[in-house]
Image (cartoon, coloured by chain):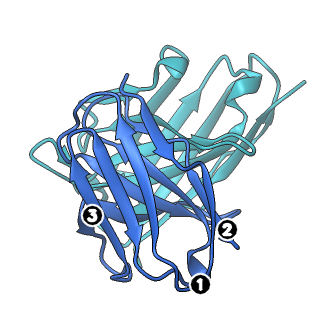
Amino acid sequence: AIQMTQSPSSLSASVGDRVTITCRASQGIRNDLGWYQQKPGKAPKLLIYAASSLQSGVPSRFSGSGSGTDFTLTISSLQPEDFATYYCLQDYNYPFTFGPGTKVDIK
Amino acid sequence: EVQLVESGGGLVQPGGSLRLSCAASGFTFSSYWMSWVRQAPGKGLEWVANIKQDGSEKYYVDSVKGRFTISRDNAKNSLYLQMNSLRAEDTAVYYCARVPSIAALYYGMDVWGQGTTVTVSS
């Protein structure tokens, strides 16, 4: 199975900060990667699919990049509603695998 | 409104069985792959299973192979997860999710249900 790692595991940031989260796959997965946001007690929400495509309705401050094994989620200007946990998911092959998550909280 | 609603969770003893359901509405259910994803208390997300639009292909995470069965009824716009031989480590919130795909490429899980809680305990 493809292993997904994320860094950092958590970060503290302020409103307006630029935030970058990294996801790394244990083998190449082309651009078959998505990013999800989850708030406590809620279902995950798709932000980015195919590594860099913004899901409909998601604010443009979210962006994704990368291909192969290394991927990045960037929030250009952190907003109060962005404090959450972020997961990457590879859907390149089975079993699909999620990263362990990155918790973004308020500094 | 596009919606997924899970049901069927509850408390079950180790070794027991449970059947989860996911009712879809607001979209053409038969056009989408579907997934089950779970989250143990305080833990991250874990993909559990996928099923193709016509049910002809099914995939599972190793930890549930031989114990869980994913299925669907397109006439009823419903997805199911039959869980047998349940273990304490299966305790989790279970989500169903819609998976857009084109030509064997997937485009994320774009619609999620609210989740249903399964607790395996004696």
Residue B42: horizontal and vertical position, in percent? 74, 45
Specify the subunit that label 2 lies on. A
Q: Residues within 10 Å of mark 2 (few under 14, many from 20)?
A: some
Q: Which chain is the one coloured cyan? A: B
Give the vertical position of A29 relative to A15 (above or below): above
Between A75 and A56, the residue placed more toward the observer is: A75
Residue B104: horizontal and vertical position, in percent? 14, 41
Query: Which residue in the protein does label 3 denote?
Result: B28
Specify the subunit that label 1 lies on. A
Q: Real-space Cα distance between discs 3 and 2?
A: 38 Å
Colour in which chain A is drawn:
blue
Q: Is residue A71 left or right of residue A44?
A: left
Query: Which residue in the protein does label 1 denote?
Result: A15
Q: Which labelled disc corresponds to residue A105? A: 2
Q: Which labelled disc corresponds to residue A39? A: none
Residue A1: horizontal and vertical position, in percent? 37, 22
